[in-house]
Amino acid sequence: MMSYKRGPRCWWPHLVSKALSLAISYALTLSLREKGKEMYASAGCLLSLHHSEKPEHEEVCEFRPYTCPCPGASCKWQGSLEAVMPHLMHAHKSITTLQGEDIVFLATDINLPGAVDWVMMQSCFGHHFMLVLEKQEKYEGHQQFFAIVLLIGTRKQAENFAYRLELNGNRRRLTWEATPRSIHDGVAAAIMNSDCLVFDTSIAHLFADNGNLGINVTISMC
């Protein structure tokens, strides 16, 4: 039987192989993490989600760009929250802004045919609120009005406020109180969830004066 003296074992190939495996594993982990990040990660969202969960989250993510909040407009603007008011002041100069927590939102010519939107801004407590009255024709001859207040801010900021809409006239009063919606949600979502003051044409005429409807709007801090 032949015998030979065994020399010291060479560990170099083993170490290289192990280091390479670790590097590949780390790269794959990073890649998977990147794929798990949603599309607004660059804007500050830190969530890592399974790909099946991403679409639902991205619909409500606070870091997604803000769109122009003007209802019924064909404006395709998108940008940061800080850029919303400068955009409105530059591109939608016809919108009136009133100061104070208690104002009157006057919608003129409510008998105009078809779908119509009335928009006004209210500034108080260091924030800006968008007041919207929207008229929709549900079916021929039957129209409905939807009134709502939106905060030019995040959903979390909106939770710090409450608003009251009030129609007064002819010894009648119609009141709605709620938390303002963030412009991230938009008017359509509020209407879809009936989270707004809703009334029909006959009610509007009870409170209107020569075709003009005044809505008392009061903003308060919670």
Image (cartoon, rainbow, N blue to C red):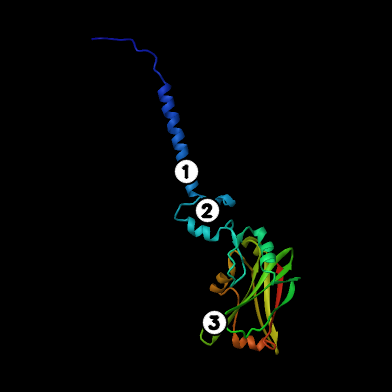
Circle 1 is placed at which residue position? 31
Check whether the beta carbons of the residues at disc 2 and disc 3 lie within 8 A of each other.
no
Circle 3 is placed at which residue position? 137
The C terminus: image quadrant: bottom right
Element type where label 1 sits in the image: helix
Cα–Cα span, label 2 and label 3? 37 Å
Cα–Cα span, label 1 and label 2? 15 Å
Element type where label 3 sits in the image: strand
Q: Where is residue 90 in the image (x, y as percent from the top left)?
A: 69, 65
Q: Where is residue 156 in the image (x, y as percent from the top left)?
A: 63, 60
Q: Quadrant of residue 191?
A: bottom right
The N terminus: image quadrant: top left
Categorize mark 3 by other alpha carbons within 10 Å: few (<14), some (14-19), many (20+).
some
Check whether the beta carbons of the residues at disc 1 and disc 2 lie within 8 A of each other.
no
Element type where label 2 sits in the image: loop
Residue type at mark 2 is Met
- Decide which of 136, 189 is in the foreground and name it: 136
Q: Position of residue 43 (x, y in %)?
A: 59, 52
Q: In which quarter of the image is residue 98?
A: bottom right
Q: Which residue is drawn at 58% across and 84% down?
A: 113
Cα–Cα span, label 1 and label 3? 51 Å
Q: Left or right of 6: which side holds 23? A: right
- Decide which of 44, 222 is in the foreground and name it: 44
Circle 2 is placed at which residue position? 39
